[in-house]
Image (cartoon, rainbow, N blue to C red):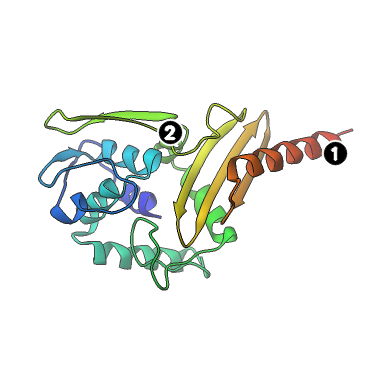
Amino acid sequence: MTALLVLEHWSPDAVVKVSPLAAAASGSRLGLRAGEQLSMAAALDALLVTSANDACLALAEHVAGSVTGFVASMNRKARELHLDATSFRNPCGLDAPGHRSSASDLYRLAMLAMSKAEFARAARMPGITISTLGGRRFSKDSGNKLLGRLPGTVGVKSGFTSGAGKCLVALVRRGTDEVAVVLLNAPDRWWSASILVEDAFTALDASRH
């Protein structure tokens, strides 16, 4: 949802400033420092490819002026999309009372996001190398370990918190066929996703004979 709202205000060369709040982000992060600047495009890549919470908060503040305002926009958008099991308390997916979603809502949200060219481009990247406007450079691999390993994988996003466990939304395309998998609290998400995807494609092939 964070990426979708960012794309509604998309200006790839816009300058995103890193606040002390963003620089102090917990969990997965790029390592941005307060006062640094980067392009909106670089920040979005960091968010989507490496789950960088410092880039996430910087984007939220850039778009809405505050994290609180951005979260309010997230919840309005969730209601517009009829994501009835979804409620946001922060932009980065961190554990918080009342912050929740469902496999069905995450599937719908991911498919909508993948219809956006900039999101789809970032979602399939195996890694990023980006720089702040001051020249500090970061190189990190994607958190989605299916990319480059499971044939046809084109996205979309992995995540982990202690409350939600290991989660994954994966999209795989082969020929004219497409298989999506949503796993929540899945200890062996890469193995489980691979098995489910291969079984689904086998069933699709069998249905044609």
Q: Nearer the viewer, residue 189 or 105?
A: 189
Seen from this angle, which residue lies furthest right? 209
**Which of marks 2 and 1 precedes in the sequence?**
2
Left or right: where does residue 76 sit relative to residue 35?
A: right
Using the image, determine if residue 17 lies above or below residue 89: above
Which circle marks residue 49 in the picture? none
For label 1, the residue is 207
Amino acid, disc 2? Arg
- Would you place residue 205 above or below residue 21 in this image? above
Is the residue marked by circle 1 packed among few (<14), some (14-19), or many (20+) residues within 10 Å?
A: few
> Residue shown at 14%/53% (left/top)?
20
Q: Residue furthest bottom?
A: 98
Rendered position, 205 above or below 104: above
Give the residue pinned by disc 2. 121
Residue 150: x and y in percent read 61, 30
- Count residues near mark 2 (Cα–Cα under 10 Å), then give few for <14, some for 14-19, many for 20+: some
Residue found at x 64% / y 42%: 193
Could you say where residue 80 lies in the image, as x and y percent from the top left? 45, 66
Looking at the picture, tell me which residue is in the foreground, 6 or 19: 19
The residue tagged with tag 1: helix, strand or loop? helix
Count of numbered labels shown in the rendering: 2
Name the residue at 13% across, 41% down. 36
- At horizontal 60% and vertical 51% (from top left) the residue drawn is 182
Question: In what quadrant of the picture does the N terminus appear?
Answer: bottom left
